[in-house]
Amino acid sequence: MRENNKLYSFYFIALFIAVLAFGLYVRFTKFEIWEKNRDAFFYSGEPIYSEFDSMYFARLAENIKSGSFKAGDVDSLRFFPDNRLKAQDFGLDEKYDFQLKYSVVGSLISYIFAYLSVLSGKSIAWLSYYLVPLLSISAAIPIFLYFYSAGLPISAILGSLVGITSSVYIARTNIMRLDTDLLNLTFPFLIAFLLYRYFESERKLLWISFSSIALLLYYLWYGHNNINFALILPVIILYLIRYRSLSKKDILYIAILILPQIWYIYAGPYYLYIQIATLIFGKGPEVSVYSIFKDFPNVFISISELQKYSFKTVLQSTNSVEVFSFIGLLGAFLVFILNIRSMIFLLPIFGIGLLSFFGGNRFVMYLGPFIGVGLGYFIHFLFEKVFPKLDLYTERNKQIAMSTLIGSLLFLLTLMVQDRALVLLGSSPIITSREVEIMDWIRKNTPSSSIIYTWWDTGYAFELYSKRAVLHDGGSQSTPKTYFVARSFTTEDPKEAWNITSFLSNYGLVGMASILLKEGIGGEELVRRVKDGIYSKDIKEPIYWVLTEDMLFKSGWITYFGSYNFKEKRGVSKNIYGLSCKIVSEKIFECLGNRKIDLDKGLIIDKSKTTRLKALYFIDDNSPKIIEYNKDGPSILLIQQKGNINVYMMDAGVDNTMLFKMYVLRQYDSNYFELIQDKFPTAVIYKVKGSISNKE
């Protein structure tokens, strides 16, 4: 057997160490980018997080350190005003409470970094800077152990290599990405390996105990009982098959595995269905209390990680050589078909990976290891299954020698392919120091009771850096609140925008539920009443509209939701497109795609057509300049910064929205808003008037 050859074992262990070293290399080389861009990537001497979810976990870690994190208490910074309202205030059952509360489940990462910060004296940010790369390569360990133990060492090496260096996994575990994805490959493969060893080893009590502990830790880490249920399912199936021969020890082992999980695992099947419906088919939860909001648009369709990749893109996201990925995918199926008994514990993980072809691209990271495994298995299959039947390499030693040689060459080739592809991957914070500076300004210059009214993407960032409550964030964006915020930014009427702000601040989601249930109306009628100010009241808390640069370029989705037609079940996207142009003369721009912009005549000239412009908007350090050409049509936006001119084309109607007028032009109605900070293009901040005259 291969496992008994010490030299052979040492060789593959050496290759595995090379995998870990390469995984660290491709991550730590990105530090050079960060150090070269310290002014933009660091604020107050600390690195800025590279993903918004990271800011959520970082804030929880800070709260744990300060003692303000108490499981079961309402998170005071999330989902205003529902964090301060109760269903009973509106005469509703408590099931309509939409308060978001602190929970130990799903917060293990924050606990770990909080305690490490206390022990080391280092900040959460600096710990993230150095520990994220180390944690992200840990997935290679259980992948290698599983397949090496199963007698597939080449698959073990290539699976661990591709697993931790696929472009999607690198992107989701990049520098300063303090997120559960750091161990979201490690835990499932570790649990699968422990369960595999339980069935293969004589020391069953040891392995089943470790399996149970790993399952519990994974639930505390990620909080998805549906995935834990799926990981346990192979064990249940195996025992159901052999239930007649179960011994007392078997029952004891099952109890050790299941009983510590029973408090959450019972709901696993139900939430498995819900998550598939939400993430794969984009339908969202149409059950329970959320069914009353079914008229409103599904915000999940706008979330980038839930967008479906093409078959080709999925393959390229695991290995840049598409043919390699395709062969690896076929090999992965072959592994399961020919080794189902030993591979059954990996089926749930492989199933999640295969969802990449049907649903969100977030699942691609689970597919990467199996692409590498499949590549390695083809070598094993050829030299140990196919060739011997052709009277080739019939001697065991020759099989081992040749398969190891070819496997090593494939390992080196994969190493080079991954290295070339990963060089092109960048690394940067999700927001710059200029934006963090604005958030810090809000923290220092607004009352602590202030509310930030902005698009949901940056919600976690404001919670962390401004220490202010928000209406919605990256974990609460799927409710009608997001529709109403989009509507307020899309409308042309400042009074309507104020009415919506007033409604959201006074009623929240629970108030919406109360109106819909008690008055028996639908979403469209509720929107009409809100726009007309029927539910408008004085705004009690100081609310600040914070309009940021990224919102302008998300106007496609903002206007889509804001213009949503409840009868047609769709909205109209009005986008802003960045153009790559060179200045030919003062009035002529030549852009990529054989497009010319004539600012003198107000024309966009393409190969096939000429389009009349509505207007030109020129923004520099002085007052915005506007040249009007026609009553409607697309417009051109020129933004001059530090001597450079950025050129944008805008769909018709974008320039009529509150977002464009208040952010770009700084045009606002002082009856409803007060400009308090103009840091264009980073951000423009308005305070919403608490009360207005003539509400009728």
Image (cartoon, rainbow, N blue to C red):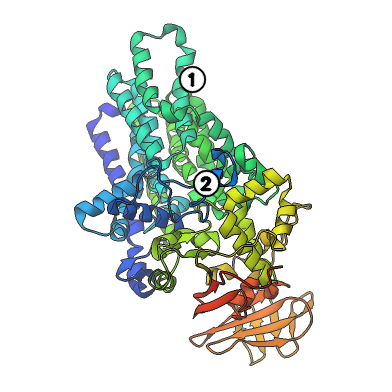
Residue in the picture at 64% in, 40% down: 286
Residue 529 seen in the figure: yes
**Quadrant into which the C terminus falls:** bottom right
User: What mark, if any, has residue 86 been given in the picture?
Assistant: 2
Query: Label 1 amino acid?
Result: Ile
Would residue 229 appear left or right of 311 to someone viewing this image? left
Would residue 154 appear left or right of 14 to someone viewing this image? right
Residue in the picture at 62% in, 59% down: 503
Give the number of callouts. 2
Residue 594, percent across and down? 69, 77
Residue 42, percent across and down? 35, 69
Query: Label 2 amino acid?
Result: Lys
Residue 282, picture quadrant:
top right
Callout 2: 10 Å neighbours few (<14), some, many (20+)? many
**Where 339 sits versus 35, above or below?**
above
Residue 316, percent across and down? 53, 51
Residue at the spot of label 1: 237
Residue extending farthest to the top is 244
Q: CA distance from mark 1 to mark 2?
A: 44 Å
**Quadrant into which the N terminus falls:** top left
Callout 1: 10 Å neighbours few (<14), some, many (20+)? few
User: What mark, if any, has residue 319 been given in the picture?
Assistant: none
Residue 280, picture quadrant:
top right
Mark before the other along the chain sequence, 1 or 2:
2
Residue 309 seen in the figure: no
Residue in the picture at 43% in, 51% down: 75
